[in-house]
Amino acid sequence: VQLQASGGGLVQAGGSLRLSCAASGRTFTFSTYVMGWFRQAPGREREFVACIKWDGTSTDYADSVKGRFTISRDNAKNTVALQINSLKPEDTAVYFCAQQRHSYYYAGRNEADFGSWGQGTLVTVSS
């Protein structure tokens, strides 16, 4: 499967953005995989942001984004979205969408558990 993230941009602190990730290729199995978002800030390691169960019934968030970010998915359109509100300068990063390695299984937050990655979209938050 190929993943294409979009929606990044420059926004002032306190603003909002909606990131989207579209899957292509082997999309008939999209609805069977946990999907997640990670981010990598300049000079820092990539970190987990959020993930969503294959059927959308369960989500998980990093403490740093809980209450501000919302992950959702549309299995009919093979997309996963990340609504990010109340942006802070420390949210500045490249945001990546990813698909877990195994269908119908939640492996955890570790990026090693995710086998397919998009190219990333840059979010820059100005103070």
Image: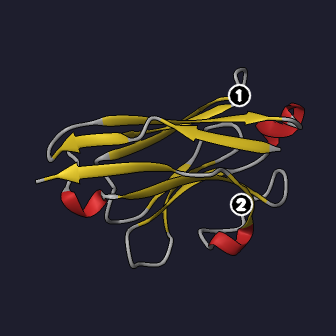
Q: Residue at x 24, y 64 (%)?
A: 90
Query: Tag 1: residue type?
Result: Asn
Q: Residue at x 71, y 60 (%)?
A: 106
Please provide percent x and percent y for residue 83: 39, 37
Give 32 or 28, whichever is nearer the viewer. 28
User: Residue reaching furthest left?
Assistant: 127
Query: Tag 2: residue type?
Result: Tyr
Q: Which residue is drawn at 73% across and 36% down?
A: 23
Numbered disc 2: secondary structure: loop
Numbered disc 1: secondary structure: loop
Mark 1 touches mark 2? (CB < 8 Å): no
Residue 116: mark in rendering? none
Q: Name the residue under label 1.
A: 75
Please provide percent x and percent y for residue 51: 56, 53
Is 22 situated left or right of 49 in this image? Answer: right
Q: Visible in this render: residue 26?
A: yes
Task: Please state, as top left, top right, bottom left or bottom right, where the C terminus lies in the image.
Answer: bottom left
Q: Determine the image quadrant of residue 14.
A: top left
From this view, report whether residue 78 is shown above or below residue 126: above
Q: Mark 2 points at which residue?
A: 106
Give 7 or 83, whichever is nearer the viewer. 7
Please provide percent x and percent y for residue 32: 81, 42
Please provide percent x and percent y for residue 30: 79, 38
Task: Give the Cα distance between marks 1 and 2.
Answer: 17 Å
Q: Determine the image quadrant of residue 27.
A: top right
